[in-house]
Image (cartoon, rainbow, N blue to C red):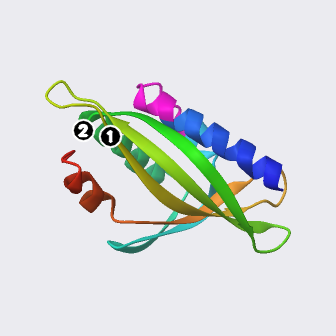
Amino acid sequence: MEARVRKFFERYESFFNRSLAGDIDMDEIASLYASDFIAASPAGVITGKNDDQLKQVMAQGYARYRAIGTKEMRIRNVRLSPIDEHHCVAHVAWTATYARQDRAVVAIDFDVHYLVQKLDGEPKVFGWVSGDEQALLRKHGII
C-alpha cells in the first residue's frame, strides 16, 4: 500500500500545481477523494460529500490561491502511519511558494495529515487535519 499512496500524492501534487496554473479538471481532482470526508483545523471540524458543491468550493479555493500569489505546492516528504491493511495516515510535508509583483518570493513549509483509504483500486482521501492556514499566511505577510 505504501508505494500506491506515495504515487497517489505525486498525482495530488501534480493536479494541485496544474490547478494553480489555471488548468483545472475538477473531475480529476474530485477523483482523489472518497465519497464522504472530514476535515479538521483550528477553525473547526467539517464534514462533506464529494459532490458538485465540493468541486465548486475547490475551484474557489484554487482561484483564491492564485489571487494571493500561490505559484507552486511541492511535497518535501510523505511519511505513512499504517492503521490496518486498508487505511493509513499520510503525513505530508509541503512547501508553498508565493510570488507577487509587490513582494519578494516567499516559501512556507507546513504539514497536512491525510486520512487515506484503499479499498478497490486507487487510494482516496477521506479526511485531513491541518494547522491554521490563515494565521500562517498572515505571519508571512501573504494576506
Please report the residue visible at 25 percent of the width from the left and 35 percent of the height from the top: 67
**68 on left or right of 124:** left
Residue pictured at 78% horizontal, 59% vertical: 118
Residue 96 place in picture, x, y as percent? 41, 42
For the residues labelled 1 and 2, the Cα–Cα distance comes to: 5 Å
Residue 12 visible here? yes
Residue at disc 2, secondary structure = loop
Q: Position of residue 53 (x, y in %)?
A: 43, 53
Between residue 37 and residue 8, name the one nearer to us.
8
- Please say whether residue 102 is one of the residues in the magenta stretch: no
Closer to the camera in the image, 61 or 10 = 10
Task: Check whether the beta carbons of the residues at disc 1 and disc 2 lie within 8 A of each other.
Answer: yes
Residue hosting label 2: 68
Q: Which mark is residue 65?
A: 1
Q: Is residue 122 visible?
A: no
**Dot 2 crowding, Cα within 10 Å, few <14, some 14–19, many 20+:** some
In the image, taking residue 42 as reference, residue 33 lies left or right, namely: right
In the image, 103 versus 27, the foreground residue is 103
Region of the chain picked out in magenta, as a range: 17-26
Residue at point 23%, 49% (across, down):
140
Which quadrant of the rendered structure holds the N terminus? Answer: bottom right
Side of 91 where 112 appears, left or right: left
Tell me residue 20's x, y (percent): 41, 32
For residue 8, which quarter of the picture? top right
Q: Is residue 13 above or below residue 84?
A: above
Q: How many marks?
A: 2
Horizontal relation, residue 134 to residue 9: left or right: left
- Amino acid type, residue under disc 2 in the picture: Ile
